[in-house]
Amino acid sequence: MRLAFWILLLVNLLLFVWGQGFFAAKQEGHEPERLQRQIEVDKLRILKDDAQPVTPAAMSAAAPGAALACRRLEGLSAEEAAALLSTVAALPTWAAGQPLLRSEAPTHWVVIPELSSRALAEKKKGELEKLGIKDSEIVEAATQGPFAVSLGVFRNQQLADEFLQSLTKKGVRSARLIQRTPPAAKFAVELRAPAEEIDQKVPDLLPPQAQVKLVDCGAS
């Protein structure tokens, strides 16, 4: 047993010496060989690339006249909004957002309608003042007759009903509650263009009869 142990130990020792390359004069791929083939390692250095990536911000700053302004056109009809988008699409430095619908809810009008003359309207107004109702207004060429006396306009129907009931309790018998239909829906379009161009050229993009308002995009 002791002899077998020494034999195994001797075999392992020979295998270790052989693996280290002591029996080869020169073994290809050995670690000292690779170190010898490295030429002037101490002189290697990392070169800095002077070219910098171009960011969108840098492109904007470099482009001449790149400062953009934003304006919102309000009060456009559907046809005017469509025509504006078509026109702006052909301008390379301009951009337009999608039209925003500016619809209005119906309003509720408390009014004394169908007064045939201003004199009659003045009389009604005087009667209201005697009852302590001072916030009234004579409306000429009204939809509710040649003349009318307006007592209030409400967006909330419940508030309008309560106000009419309070008038009735004060002795006002001729007042009526009328729902007023809003005008046709209007649209708003935001435009972005070079600041020096936008205010000057916008009027040229619309038909002369267009009744629109030009405001900053941040304005409410």
Image (cartoon, helix red, strand yellow):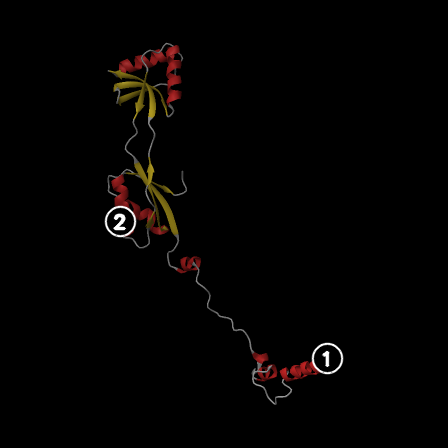
Estimate how packed mark 1 is, as few (under 14), some (14 to 19) or many (20 or more) residues with alpha carbons within 10 Å. Answer: few
Residue 74 in view in this figure? no
* Residue 180, quarter of picture: top left
**Residue that extends furthest to the bottom in the rendered view of this protein:** 25
**Residue that extends furthest to the top in the rendered view of this protein:** 171
Which residue is the site of mark 1? Answer: 5
Horizontal side of 37 relative to 140 (left or right) equals right
Image coordinates for residue 118, horizontal then vertical, percent: 27, 16
Q: Which amino acid does label 2 sit on?
A: Thr
Instruction: Give the numbered dot on residue 87.
Output: 2
Please determine whether, in this image, residue 40 is positioned above or below residue 161.
below
Considering the numbered disc 1 on the image, is that residue within a helix, a strand or a loop?
helix
Q: Which amino acid does label 1 sit on?
A: Phe
The label nearer to you, 2 versus 1, is 1
For image coordinates 37% across by 50% down, the residue present is 195
For image coordinates 34% across by 23% down, the residue present is 108
Image coordinates for residue 142, horizontal then vertical, percent: 26, 22
